[in-house]
């Protein structure tokens, strides 16, 4: 096993899938010669040529709509949206078209396609380079949504998404790209969509997170251990389908759950996780399920004081976790 | 009045179809599919007005454009991305009167959607008909994507995308034509300009007379065709298809036509267009015009016409009877195929 960054793992995942399957191709803004603004596709243009690494016009509906058509005709497109914040022009194609192709044809059509979108804050990206979009898309039946937090999961889930017969929104947290390093299993490493993973075992309380917040929660668990509190960390990895069994299991095991995400709270993923726990593990709870999330404001401001005020961080999570532990 | 009306065209040369490479049989086949599209549509209105089915949306008046253009494509090899009026297109591409009626009655056996979508939302993978939803113009990007895949695999299949002049206002129309132009994709964009987007006349949809003029902005040709002249539509499409198949890129064909019915069974077109205008266009009915041509060409005798009428009515009767009695989906069908899964036997 080699230690890699998240961005390296993503690039490697695409490269391997393009090598093994000639129907896999990438389309997006600056993905060609430039190799993507984050270098996710660095080197792929030279290796696979302009018919498989396509610089699209600056038009997100075009990127997704063309990917849908190509998927209809036997291809497996990876559509890159440069920043998750710019996905709105493609919403009609994603929600009204991609998500409904199978359902509206009673299974006659299906769309094996991936929409990759760098998301999340903490990178001085301001309102339009920091957003979280997972709850919006997880609400739409017909879509799958994944949000890996480690290099191994980034690669394994990307490979699974590319091979999946349905449209998958693949969210890669910008802050994790080079911050988070980890061992990536060699060989054909595929992580199944829909399976959460316990990243740290514990008995006193559970931290449930995904994306960058996974890294923060692992930090917090370490600090809690210093207090004599044993925290379990469950990494959702897949937002939709969500791993209900894993959520229920950790809630039943510890009886105390803190859900963490940087997306806004209202009708968010934490709310869904809490509902799953209430419906299935209420009798096992020793405290109300709690959450740490971004605030209900339109987006993350540029100024560093405001950005820090928006972002959940290890300190905020630790504070809430201690509150929960003390109940 | 949204569209300029002209005198009904006088007779063309009786060998026009042959000069376009169409045999007498093919010329008659085109006529029969136009007749079938019209007859199915008329029956749907009848049934809707009797309260036996909730919704109908029509092809009437546009059959010449639809069948004329579809006839220039290779069925089963080329692709179409139709819009909701394109009964003529999908019947040419292999769907049947029975399929149409199963969709109209929203039965489980409806091959488009298993009774999930409203009528007119066509789709059939085997027949290379790309599924469509209700938002307009999205299918133009799908067509560009289908054509991109053909190019990536070095296949010479052509994809035709159909839309109304209202959909021409959507951003997806621009994005699709722009992308197809850049990559010289084998797409034929077909704008069926019937003068109205529900009630809004063309003059409030755009400041230009011809949608086709926009093709210049995308680097490919745009042509305006009399949409009620089926052979003119066929001719324009054939040229566009040949150009696309040669790898020379897209064409935008604008067919000037008219819808005879209201937008749908829930619309009242008397609120926005004068009856006289409809009457003028009815005189230019593409089916009657083509029938006149075929008679003058000596290939549509009274006997042949009678045979066609007989076959068409029989198909419509059989389809109606079959579909009306066909089973509905069950409540269990509500939750299937959200994602790809094993098809039920």
Image (cartoon, helix red, strand yellow):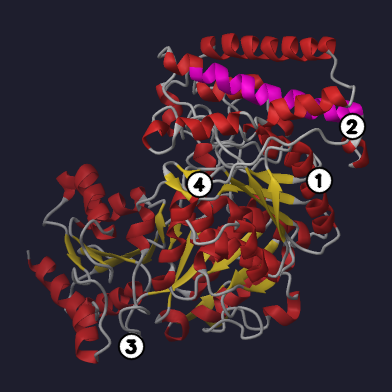
Circle 2 SS class = loop
Closer to the chain start, of discs 4 and 1, is 4
Q: Please tell me whether residue B104 is drawn above or below residue A304 in the rendered image.
A: above
- Spatial separation of the CA atoms under disc 4 and disc 3: 53 Å
- Tell me if I can see residue A259 in this picture: yes
The residue wearing badge 3 is A124
- Spatial separation of the CA atoms under disc 4 and disc 1: 26 Å
Tell me how many marks there are: 4
- Spatial separation of the CA atoms under disc 1 and disc 3: 58 Å
- Tell me if I can see residue A194 in this picture: no
Return the mark for residue B14: 2
Locate the N terminus of chain A and report the quarter of the image it occupies: bottom right
Return the mark for residue B2: 4
Mark 4 nearby-residue class (10 Å; few <14, some 14–19, many ≥20): some
Circle 1 SS class = helix
Q: Is B23 in front, or is B200?
A: B200
Which is more foreground, mark 4 or mark 3? 4
Same chain, labels 2 and 4 = yes
Please, which chain is the residue tagged with disc 2 on? B
- Spatial separation of the CA atoms under disc 2 and disc 3: 73 Å
Please, which chain is the residue tagged with disc 3 on? A
Start and end of the magenta stretch?
A: B24-45
């Amino acid at each position: 096993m080699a230690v890699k960054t998240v961005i390296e793992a993503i690039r490697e995942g695409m490269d391997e899938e393009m090598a093994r399957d000639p129907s896999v191709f990438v389309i997006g803004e600056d993905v060609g010669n430039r190799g993507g603004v984050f270098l996710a596709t660095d080197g792929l243009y030279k290796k696979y040529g302009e018919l498989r690494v396509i610089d699209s016009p600056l038009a997100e509906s075009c990127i997704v709509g063309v990917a849908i058509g190509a998927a209809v005709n036997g291809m497996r497109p990876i559509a890159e949206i440069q920043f998750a914040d710019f996905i709105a022009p493609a919403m009609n194609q994603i929600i009204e078209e991609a998500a409904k192709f199978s359902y509206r044809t009673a299974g006659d059509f299906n769309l094996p396609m991936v929409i990759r979108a760098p998301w999340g804050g903490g990178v001085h990206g301001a309102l339009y380079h920091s957003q979280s979009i997972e709850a919006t898309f997880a609400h739409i039946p017909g879509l799958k949504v994944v949000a890996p937090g480690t290099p191994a999961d980034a690669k394994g889930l990307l490979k699974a998404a590319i091979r999946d017969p349905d449209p998958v929104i693949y969210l890669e947290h910008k802050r994790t790209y080079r911050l988070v390093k980890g061992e990536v299993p060699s060989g054909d490493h595929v992580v199944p969509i829909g399976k959460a993973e316990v990243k740290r075992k514990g008995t006193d309380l559970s931290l449930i997170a995904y994306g960058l917040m996974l890294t923060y929660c692992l930090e917090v668990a370490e600090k809690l251990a210093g207090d004599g509190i044993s925290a379990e960390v469950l990494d959702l990895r897949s937002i939709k389908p969500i791993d209900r069994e894993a959520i229920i299991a950790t809630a039943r095991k510890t009886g105390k759950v803190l859900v963490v995400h940087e997306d806004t709270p209202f009708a968010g993923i934490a709310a869904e996780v809490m509902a799953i726990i209430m419906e299935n593990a209420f009798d096992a709870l020793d405290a109300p399920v709690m959450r740490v999330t971004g605030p209900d404001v339109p987006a993350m401001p540029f100024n560093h004081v405001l950005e820090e005020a928006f972002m959940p961080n290890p300190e905020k999570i630790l504070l809430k976790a201690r509150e929960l532990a003390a109940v | 009045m949204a569209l300029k009306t002209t005198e009904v065209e006088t007779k063309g040369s009786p060998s026009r179809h042959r000069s376009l490479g169409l045999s007498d049989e093919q010329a008659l086949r085109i006529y029969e599919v136009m007749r079938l599209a019209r007859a199915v549509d008329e029956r749907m209105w009848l049934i809707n007005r009797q309260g036996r089915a909730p919704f109908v949306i029509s092809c009437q008046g546009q059959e010449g454009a639809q069948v004329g253009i579809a006839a220039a494509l290779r069925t089963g090899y080329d692709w179409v991305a139709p819009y909701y009026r394109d009964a003529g297109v999908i019947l040419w591409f292999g769907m049947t009167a029975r399929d149409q009626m199963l969709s109209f009655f929203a039965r489980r056996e409806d091959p488009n959607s298993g009774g999930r979508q409203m009528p007119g939302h066509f789709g059939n993978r085997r027949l290379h008909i790309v599924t469509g939803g209700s938002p307009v113009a999205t299918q133009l990007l799908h067509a560009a994507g289908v054509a991109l895949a053909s190019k990536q695999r070095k296949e010479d299949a052509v994809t035709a995308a159909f839309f109304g002049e209202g959909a021409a206002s959507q951003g997806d129309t621009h994005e699709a034509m722009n992308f197809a132009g850049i990559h010289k994709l084998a797409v034929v964009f077909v704008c069926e300009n019937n003068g109205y987007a529900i009630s809004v006349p063309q003059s409030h949809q755009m400041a230009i007379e011809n949608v086709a003029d926009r093709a210049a902005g995308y680097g490919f040709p745009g042509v305006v065709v009399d949409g009620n002249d089926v052979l003119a539509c066929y001719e324009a499409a054939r040229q566009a298809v040949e150009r696309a198949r040669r790898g020379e890129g897209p064409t935008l064909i604008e067919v000037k036509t008219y819808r005879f019915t209201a937008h749908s069974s829930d619309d009242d077109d008397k609120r926005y267009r004068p009856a006289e205008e409809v009457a003028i266009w009815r005189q230019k009915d593409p089916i009657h015009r083509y029938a006149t041509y075929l008679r003058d060409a000596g290939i549509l005798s009274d006997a042949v016409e009678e045979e066609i009428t007989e076959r068409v009515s029989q198909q419509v009767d059989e389809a109606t009877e079959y579909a009306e009695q066909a089973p509905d989906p069950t409540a269990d069908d509500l939750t299937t195929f959200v994602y790809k899964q094993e098809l039920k036997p």
